[in-house]
């Protein structure tokens, strides 16, 4: 990110390891607006880090998944509860995408 170790960042800023860790998540989110809000005191650093950390972690997981061989992907899928993955991730994402595109089906059609 910026070339400093955590220890160097603490020494240069008079901060704490926890504060530096929170800032690491904000920087990794690559959201200039959020970074601006935190730096200028318009957003709490802890709340901001808590907000972006899951998405940053998911991006890392996605990158790791892409590196798996087909056999490794099958082994991973066999270990997961695929019904939960589908019900909690894939189906809602498809629904949100349809809504964003203005293609949401009427509730009666969805029930079928």
Image (spheres, rainbow, N blue to C red):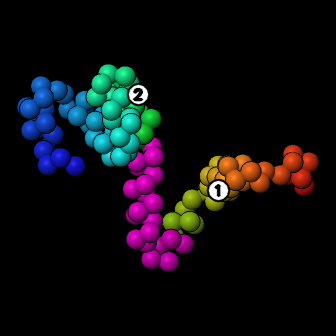
Q: Earlier in the sequence, mark 1 or mark 2?
A: 2
- Look at 67% across and 49% down and name the residue there: 100
Residue 33 in percent (x, y) is at: 38, 36
Q: Quadrant of residue 23?
A: top left
User: From this viewpoint, is residue 84 visible?
Assistant: no
Residue span colored magenta? 54-74
Q: Nearer the viewer, residue 64 or 107?
A: 107
Which residue position is annotated with label 2? Answer: 47
Which residue position is annotated with label 1? Answer: 90
Residue 92 in percent (x, y) is at: 68, 49
Query: Does 22 lie within the magenta span?
Result: no
User: From this viewpoint, is residue 31 visible?
Assistant: yes
Which quadrant would the C terminus be assigned to in this image? bottom right
Residue 99 vs 82, above or below: the answer is above
How many numbered discs, if any? Answer: 2
- Look at 74% across and 51% down and name the residue there: 102
Residue 81 in the figure: left or right of residue 39? right
Q: Which type of secondary structure does the marked residue at label 2 adopt? A: helix
Q: Determine crowd level at label 2: few under 14, some 14-19, many 20+ residues with C-alpha closer than 10 A.
A: few
């Amino acid at each position: 990110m910026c070339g400093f170790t955590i220890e160097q960042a603490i020494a240069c800023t008079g901060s704490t390891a926890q504060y530096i860790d929170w800032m690491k998540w904000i920087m990794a989110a690559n959201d200039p607006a959020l970074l601006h809000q935190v730096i200028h005191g318009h957003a709490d650093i802890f709340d901001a880090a808590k907000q972006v950390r899951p998405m940053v972690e998911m991006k890392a997981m996605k990158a790791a998944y892409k590196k798996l061989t087909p056999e490794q992907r099958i082994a991973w899928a066999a270990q997961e509860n695929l019904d939960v993955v589908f019900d909690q991730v894939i189906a809602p994402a498809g629904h949100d995408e349809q809504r964003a595109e203005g293609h949401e089906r009427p509730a009666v059609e969805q029930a079928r």
